[in-house]
Image: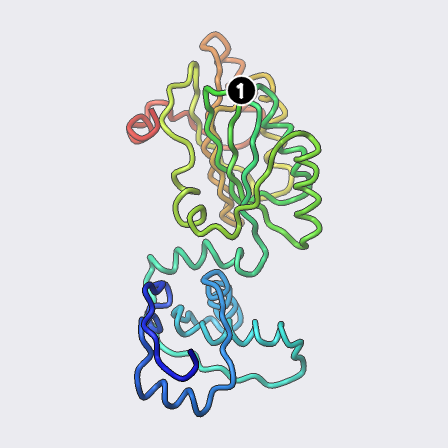
Amino acid sequence: AGDQRVILDQVGGFADGVAVKEVGEETFRICKELIDGVVLVSRDSICASIKDMFEEKRNILEPAGALALAGAEAYCKHHGVQGKDIVVITSGANMNFDKLRVVTELANVGRKQEAVLATVLPEEPGSFKQFCELVGQMNITEFKYRYNSNEKAVVLYSVGIHTVSELRAMQERMESSQLKTYNLTESDLVKDHLRYLMGGRSNIQNEVLCRFTFPERPGALMKFLDPSSPRWNISLFHYRGEGETGANVLVGIQVPKSEMDEFHDRANKLGYDYKVVNNDDDFQLLMH
């Protein structure tokens, strides 16, 4: 209703500086006189604007302060505004490291530079390698997979995207190979929780758990897979790119004890730093 204040049942707390269930009486009076319209923006868009401001000015805005910046961008895009001076008010410094972690996770999604997907794979040797080949030149930015005793496994992953058509073409490649693929980019539940809880407890026969450091360059993942798959089954994979310092990767591979010497020989020839961490107490506690 445009002529009266309303009380909302729920309010998202991310932009907590403006997260009120009821607009103030004086604020409402002024808005009725001066405001011509309202622009709605998503949490992801706010995160993207925080990143933009940091990269351009090295200033870190709070979510409520970046709200106007995200709204102005959405307004200009919707109306095709170009070559005009747009003024927005950014305020406050209500930012902490916990919230900053969320911002960094969602900023690329908000800028349409990253997409979150899930693909169903047959649980058989070589399927993981086939999946990577179908991803093609798309840059994988995060990857979560855990072996399942059932016939199917679900891979949760993120890819850096440049155009909508590239993402659609990759999904079509998956579907044409009978690998059902879901775009979960808009799901806050997946981005906030399920991407971290993906998998579960499982006792895998002959599983060797390793930490690898992958160089951040195209082809690093396929170079790793070539000598190991389909020779041995990949049972766990968690990858997150971290920039020029390289990517920390946790890998589970089913290798019989009699073939461990061959495994170490192949791993050493890769030239990637790695360490076997089978006896890590935290892994045993949380995953077995």
The colour scheme used to paint the residues is rainbow
Camera-nearest residue between 229 and 172? 172
Q: Is residue 73 left or right of residue 236?
A: right
Q: Is mark 1 on a helix, strand or loop?
A: strand
Q: Where is residue 193 in the image (x, y as percent from the top left)?
A: 39, 45
Q: Residue at x 37, y 67 (%)?
A: 15
Residue 261 in the image: above or below residue 176? above
- What residue lies at 30% left-to-right and 85% top-to-bottom? 25
Q: Which of 43 and 27 is in front in this view?
A: 27
Q: In which quarter of the image is the C terminus?
A: top left
Q: Position of residue 101 (x, y in %)?
A: 39, 56
Residue lying at the far bottom of the rendered structure: 33
Task: Please state if 202 lies on the left or on the right of 155 as rendered.
Answer: left
- Total marks drawn? 1
Left or right of 54, for residue 183:
right
Depth check: 77 or 30 in front? 30
The image quadrant of residue 271 is top right
The amino acid at mark 1 is Asn
Measured as percent of width and height from the top left, residue 88 is found at: 49, 82
Callout 1 environment at 10 Å: few (<14), some (14 to 19), or many (20+)?
Answer: many
Looking at the rendered image, the quarter that the N terminus falls into is bottom left
Q: Which residue lies furthest to the top in this view?
A: 258
Give the residue at x 71% y 44%: 169
The residue at 51%/43% (across/down) is: 142
- Picture coordinates of residue 69, whole percent (x, y): 50, 74
Residue 75 vertical position relative to residue 125 in the rendered view, above or below = below
Check the image and report above or below for 203 versus 37: above
Q: Mark 1 points at which residue?
A: 233
Apparent side of residue 138 relative to residue 51 in the rendered image (left or right)? right
